[in-house]
Image (cartoon, rainbow, N blue to C red):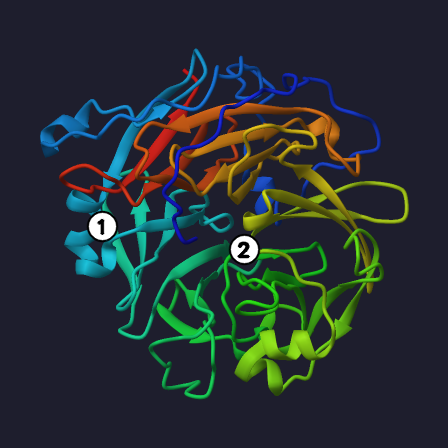
Amino acid sequence: MSLRRATASAVTLVLGLAACQEPGLEPSLATDQNALAPSFYRTASFEQFTPIAGSAACVAPPSLLADFATYQPLVLPQGFAQRILADEIGGFRPVAGSGGDLPDMMTLNETGPQAGRFMYRTHEVGSNGALTVTDLETGITTLADQQSHYEALDGIVWTPWGTVLFAEERIVASLKDPQAPNAVGGLTYEYDPATKTSRPLLAFGARSHEGLRFDRDGNLYGISESTPGVNGSGAIYKFVPDVKGDLSSGQLYALKVTDASTREGAAEWVALDRDAVKINSDAEAIAKSATGWGRPEDIEIIRLQGGTFREVMFVTSTSEDLVLRIELNGDKATVSNYVKEGINVTGLDNPDNLALDVHGNLYIIEDNGPGDIWAVDRSERTRKVASKVSLFASVSDCSAEPTGLYFDRTGRKAWVHVQHAGGVLRNDLFVELTRP
């Protein structure tokens, strides 16, 4: 997520969030990463908020480290609270050195005997990238994994079998992994907390990675954060492992929309050459005429019940100020422009990260300054085009962006990073959001 430092345009809110649950929808299962998001529909619900009036006014963060104890980096709706749990200076760099800068995407350990206790995060530095983990019970941050050739670590997801996937956001890698010296772009890695070892997942492809999510069948989806005709394919990918739960081998596909002029409507997953994708999956997707978008970045998947499809995937297209909605149906799919600046929202600028809570409210996080966080009501998820979008939060440090928004399974907490922090100290933050 390359930070674009700009002033957000004026925000116009489009309706508030609805509170009802529509029929024909199936809750996520406990083995799915979305099932670990909160049910904000009981007491102290996140869903029940009054949208903020607009983007935050730019305010520089503290110039003294002690003042971060009371610093409030986000503008939130009335009734919400925030506190800093860890920061770059006091938490990340002590364990990872310069590799502990730029905390990015995050995930809890979503399964296992201590599920929900450990928050894993990537660090988006140019070399010596780190995977750090914060114990939410003790508040202690430690180093999970770090290698000199890790660069621009970004996307992350907890797997159904209890490991962590994390990936590099590099169209052309500057530092080569000795296990994949011919790979052109970034790689995805699997970290096993039990053995504290990592391995590259070459079959998933070499390209600029970010969003990573599984469907209910154990297939893995990703993107190429690039732009067609400029520096890559801008494609969306699906990986079907040969053996469920083993991502070391399998078939990689790229999405191709039938109507290339609109890039909406019927689509199919086209198979890519297994050897070619290990070198450059962008080049292979282009060769197979896959559809491209402007800098796809993050992914979320939600389950639906009934009809001709079971799951819906949302994907951001950052440079197009667009969020796609993709109905998944085996080797077929249906694509629509779900949220689009100037169509059903005003003020959406560089949508980057996505987050879902367990009932399907979708949060859209901007890569911008001030970085805003938008919300789309769960009642909209069966629509091809959303009609209700609201402004949930905004970061007041206009040099920074909010990244990695993540919700817990209790319905009472969420977390977000403040990355690329400005001010004298440039102290990136790990912030907890609650509704007391």
Q: From the viewer's perspective, is 204 left or right of 73?
A: right
Q: Which tag is nearer the camera, tag 2 or tag 1?
A: 2
Q: Secondary structure at mark 2?
A: loop
Q: Is residue 251 visible?
A: no
Which residue is at 79% across, 57% downward? 261
Q: Quadrant of residue 48?
A: top right
Which residue in the structure is indicated by mark 1? 92
Q: From the viewer's perspective, is 203 left or right of 66?
A: right
Relative to 77, is 427 above or below? below
Q: Secondary structure at mark 1?
A: helix
Q: Quadrant of residue 138?
A: top left
* Along the line of sight, the residue nearer the viewer: 215 or 382: 382
Relative to 326, is 342 above or below? above
Report the amino acid beneath label 1. Phe
Which residue in the structure is indicated by mark 2? 211
Tag 1 or tag 2, which sits nearer the N-term?
A: 1
Q: From the viewer's perspective, is 402 left or right of 348?
A: left
Report the amino acid beneath label 2. Gly
Expressed as whole percent of the image width and height from the top left, the position of residue 84 reads 27, 31
Expressed as whole percent of the image width and height from the top left, the position of residue 92 reads 22, 50
Expressed as whole percent of the image width and height from the top left, the position of residue 413 reads 44, 29
* Along the line of sight, the residue nearer the viewer: 127 or 289: 289
